[in-house]
Amino acid sequence: MPRNLGTTLRTALATLALVLAATALAQSWTPYELKGPAYFRFVTTENGGPELGYSVDIRASSVVDEEGAPLFEVTTTRTSYQPLENALMGDMMGLMTGFTSMYLMMLVPALADMDMVAGERMSLFGAGRVTVLGQETHGGRTGHHLLLESKNSEDEYERAFEWVIDFDLPLPIATRYYEEGELTREERLVEYHTN
């Protein structure tokens, strides 16, 4: 399938997911809403390249904003491999790009309608589907393994994204990206603790 057709199909799928999400009554998972200080360390691989890493360390502080609300100390680190001349100008914005997937965000409210039992499947108006594959453990945390498939130009389902979601954490503990059904990028939690 040509990449622009794949993008069109994914955009259509995302739009359908948004409509579905808007009709959901409750959320069973609240992504990106921290409950307190925590430490996350992830590794990522892309197209068979070296394993890279990043971490986010969120700690309480004595600093408050103008209205007296507490501010938290947030430290991020990123491990990458760059030519020396790019070492200070590398991909500084790449941190956590995989976990800000608009597809996942649009599906979050719809997840409340799923029982999270292996084999359960939800259709996205015939343009795609979400399937619960079971559970996986990463970084000592266990989550629900979800597969999002979209239809290709031959009207067949192919893998688009996978997420492993621990409903007690604000970030997926694993994410996998597929292009034309082939795995191109994977991110997974290797360490987590509260601070």
Image (cartoon, rainbow, N blue to C red):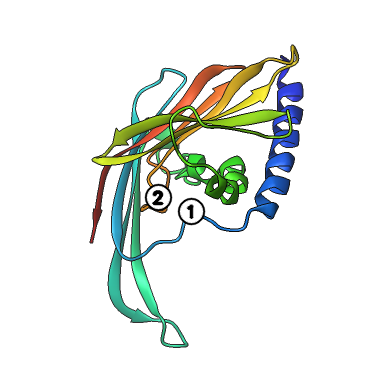
Q: Quadrant of residue 174?
A: top left
23 relative to 28 in the view: left or right: right
Q: Cβ–Cβ below 8 Å for labels 1 and 2?
A: yes
> SS class of the residue under badge 1?
loop
N-term-proximal mark, 1 vs 2: 1
Residue 128 shows in this picture? yes
Circle on res. 5: none
The residue to which callout 2 is attached is 167
Q: What is the residue that sits farthest to the top in this orientation?
A: 154
30 relative to 191 in the view: left or right: right
The crowd level at tag 1 (other Cα within 10 Å; few <14, some 14-19, many 20+) is: some
Residue 195: image location, x then y, percent = 23, 61
Q: Residue at x 58, y 17 (%)?
A: 181
The crowd level at tag 2 (other Cα within 10 Å; few <14, some 14-19, many 20+) is: some
Figure check: 85 above or below 65: above
Residue 51: image location, x then y, percent = 34, 27
State how far apart marks 1 and 2 are (Cα): 7 Å
Q: Residue at x 26, y 39 (%)?
A: 139
Residue 82: image location, x then y, percent = 40, 31
Q: Quadrant of residue 88?
A: top left
51 relative to 17 in the view: left or right: left
The residue to which callout 1 is attached is 28
Q: Residue at x 37, y 41 (%)?
A: 173
Which residue occupies the foreground of this view, 99 or 147?
147
Q: What kind of residue is marked 2?
A: Phe
> SS class of the residue under badge 2?
loop
Figure check: 133 above or below 28: above
Which residue occupies the foreground of this view, 88 or 146?
146
Which of the image's four quarters has the N terminus?
Answer: top right
